[in-house]
Amino acid sequence: MTIFLETERVILRQFTDTEADGELLLELDSDPEVMRYIGPFGLGSADAYRARIRTNWFAYYAAHPARGVWAAIEKSTNQFMGWFLLRPSTDYRFAGEAGWTRPTDIEIGYRMRKAAWGRGLATEVAARLVKLTLDDPAVTCVVACALVPNRASTRVMEKVGMLCVREFMLPGFPDPCVMYAVCREGCKVL
């Protein structure tokens, strides 16, 4: 197990292409409440998640030590709580709609099981990730987005110092999406 980061209550580790990690992701994305603001984009099988880990996520780990998608494990229970990601903003499937054209802007994202909701875990980890990312002189901004009704996600963004930049529409979603950002001194959001 390769640990990327530890906070007071959470360990972030790299995903593996094992059956166990595939099952964890399948279970997470099979919960309609977890996916309520994301859409039905699950991959349908543990094997499909394992393939995504091998083909997409391993490449992030190899390209940059602080880029990728990491499993969030609660220290006190050793339970999988969800995942966090840091990647070039241009890798977001709706980067065009979001106006994300600068690969030096890094997207932060997270998806958490219901058992983790309302406990401050997402804020605890996201705050560390934002600081870590902005400590990299090659990074201009940390960006994120969520559907406007998803106040739990936007509250995390606000609590870690990100500011609301703009709203935009995503294809296939009835509600607008809101973009948040925090930039290093002297940099502006595009």
Image (spheres, helix red, strand yellow):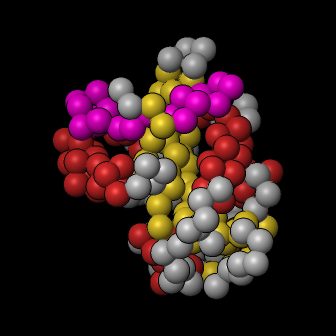
User: Is 22 covered by the magenta stretch?
Assistant: yes
Which x, y percent locates residue 187?
71, 78
Q: Looking at the picture, tell me which residue is in the foreground, 115 or 103.
A: 103
Task: Tell me where the magenta segment starts and ends, as one range.
Answer: 5-24
Q: Is residue 66 above or below residue 94?
A: above
Identify which residue is drawn at 29% across, 35% down: 16
Q: Is residue 172 visible?
A: no
99 horizontally vs 180: left or right: left
List the single residue furthest toward the front: 137
List the single residue furthest toward the top: 76
Identify which residue is drawn at 45% across, 54% down: 67
Q: How many marks?
A: 0
Quarter in which the N terminus is drawn: top left
48 horizontally vs 99: left or right: left
Q: Is residue 124 above or below residue 144?
A: above
Give the quadrant of residue 118. Answer: top right
Q: Looking at the picture, tell me which residue is in the foreground, 12 or 178.
A: 12
Q: Is residue 33 visible?
A: yes
60 horizontally vs 114: left or right: left
Which x, y percent locates residue 143?
62, 67
50 horizontally vs 147: left or right: left
Which x, y percent locates residue 109?
55, 55
Identify which residue is drawn at 54% across, 35% down: 5
Q: Is residue 152 above or below residue 189?
A: above
Quarter in which the C terminus is drawn: bottom right
Give the quadrant of residue 137. Answer: bottom right
Q: Is residue 181 above or below residue 128?
A: below
Q: Looking at the picture, tell me which residue is in the foreground, 73 or 167.
A: 73
Which x, y percent locates residue 159?
80, 51
User: Is 108 covered by the magenta stretch?
Assistant: no
